[in-house]
Image: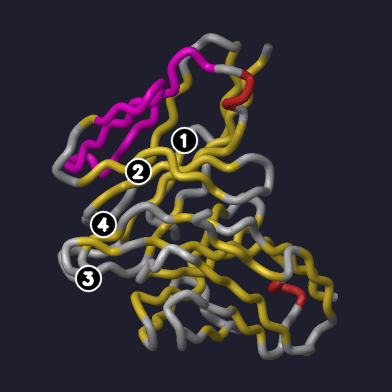
Amino acid sequence: SQQGEEDPQALSIQEGENATMNCSYKTSINNLQWYRQNSGRGLVHLILIRSNEREKHSGRLRVTLDTSKKSSSLLITASRAADTASYFCATDARGYSSASKIIFGSGTRLSIRP
Amino acid sequence: EAQVTQNPRYLITVTGKKLTVTCSQNMNHEYMSWYRQDPGLGLRQIYYSMNVEVTDKGDVPEGYKVSRKEKRNFPLILESPSPNQTSLYFCASSPLTSGGALFETQYFGPGTRLLVL
């Protein structure tokens, strides 16, 4: 099974509301990243948070990381129609050795209603 | 412009006919990777490479081959494609930091839609 699991699988909110997505993983990580994908196109990197960080901000994005619970959340504030997309978390599935496999979650489909 | 390119973007083929999907990056990244994306399954890593001549299996390597003879190129080879390899394929590259120990932001290509009949 995949290391990164996201919930909810789908989320529909009104424009202007906040959207929160969660990601859980199973093994130790060095960092966790969030990506966005518009309808079958390439993924775009949003934000990276390292294992020794607890919270990070980038514009309207806020990411938290709880390594004790092996979970992360992505908050998008003041949502816009253009935020409609799928969002994925990704982790490097290794302990303390060199970089190796990358595991993606199955994604959250976010729809913003006008 | 910094980018990852893939070719072809769309491909229809028949079972058993060997094919290669090319991937090239111009950012001098050490790490390159191939993923396939299927509905409801997210992205699954096929193969990855940490540098020239260094490749390793991801989660779903069966039926695929890769090579990394040059830093910028990482082709994906399907020696005998089968219908279950019909998918959307993405190539990605990433720098490695801290002496090659830390994985950083991945840059993705536009994707290749493959249909195997």
- Quarter of the image for the N terminus of chain A: give it: bottom left
Rendered image: mark on residue A101: none
Q: Are marks 3 and 1 on the same chain?
A: yes
Relative depth, front residue between B116 and A46: A46
Name which residue type carries label 2.
Ser
Q: In the picture, residue A57 is in which quadrant? A: top left
N-term mark: 3 or 4: 4
The image shows residue A46 at horizontal and vertical percentages of 43, 38
Residue of label 3? A98
Name which residue type carries label 1.
Asp
N-term mark: 3 or 2: 2
Q: In the picture, residue B55 is in which quadrant? A: bottom left
Closest to the camera, between mark 3 and mark 2, is 3
Residue of label 2? A24
Distance CA(mark 4)–CA(mark 2): 10 Å
The image shows residue A82 at horizontal and vertical percentages of 62, 25
Give the residue at x 31% y 47%: A32
The secondary structure that dominates the magenta segment is strand
Distance CA(mark 3)–CA(mark 4): 15 Å
Relative placement, left or right, of B42 versus B29 is right
N-term mark: 2 or 1: 1
Distance CA(mark 2)–CA(mark 1): 9 Å
Q: Are marks 3 and 4 on the same chain?
A: yes
Q: Are marks 2 and 1 on the same chain?
A: yes
Magenta range: A56-79
